[in-house]
Amino acid sequence: MKKLLLILLCLPMIGFGQDNITGIWVDKGKGYENTLILSKVQGSDNSYSFSFDGYRVSYDYFSKDTVRFFGQMSNPVFIIQVKNNKAHYDDDVQEFEEGWEIYNEGEERCNVYFTFKEKSIIVKTELCSLIYGGFGVSFDGEYFK
């Protein structure tokens, strides 16, 4: 009985484990919403596939109206390896049909940085806007289940 009580008392002290990573995470605010989906890669201890869907409401100078601009990162190559509650993805792994490139030669590629906290995930991107989303769309933010 004492062992069971000790185990139950220690459970809240256990940190953010990688078992808690999978699932649907959301960052939502005034004029925007992003959804992050993380799925465990079969046969790997710390690899996860990820995808983002989101939008930003911004004024569009062409239509002279407020418009909802969408963004998405959804591809089987979007895989991260979580180590010490951090992960990084960059588009260097992207391969396209012969003759087609998403980047110009020498152009820096999209980077996505993940920091896994106890109850949230902090996402920071570099150079991903307009490649994976419309005007002003970014996947940066703090995501909660």
Image (cartoon, rainbow, N blue to C red):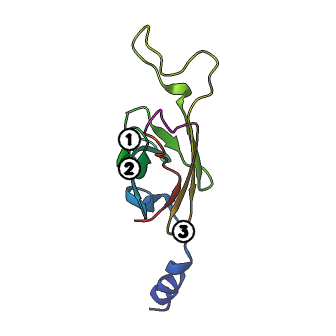
- The stretch of residues the image draws in magenta is 127-133
Q: Name which of mark 1 and mark 2 comes first in the sequence.
A: 2
Q: Give above or below for 137 relative to 107.
A: below
Label 3 belongs to which residue? 118
User: Decide: marks 3, 1 in contact (CB < 8 A)?
Assistant: no
Point out which mark residue 108 bears.
none
Q: Is residue 130 magenta?
A: yes
The residue closer to the viewer here, 101 or 80, is 101
Q: Classify residue 68 as left or right of residue 144.
A: left
Q: Position of residue 106 (x, y in %)?
A: 64, 18
Label 1 belongs to which residue? 72
The residue closer to the viewer here, 69 or 26, is 69
Q: Give above or below for 67 relative to 31.
A: above
Q: Identity of the amino acid at label 1?
A: Gln
Q: Position of residue 58 (x, y in %)?
A: 43, 51
Q: Quadrant of residue 61?
A: top left
Q: Residue at x 38, y 50 (%)?
A: 55
- CA distance for labels 3 and 1: 26 Å
Q: Give above or below for 132 relative to 31.
A: above
- CA distance for labels 3 and 2: 23 Å
Q: Which mark is nearer the camera, 3 or 2?
A: 2
Label 2 belongs to which residue? 54
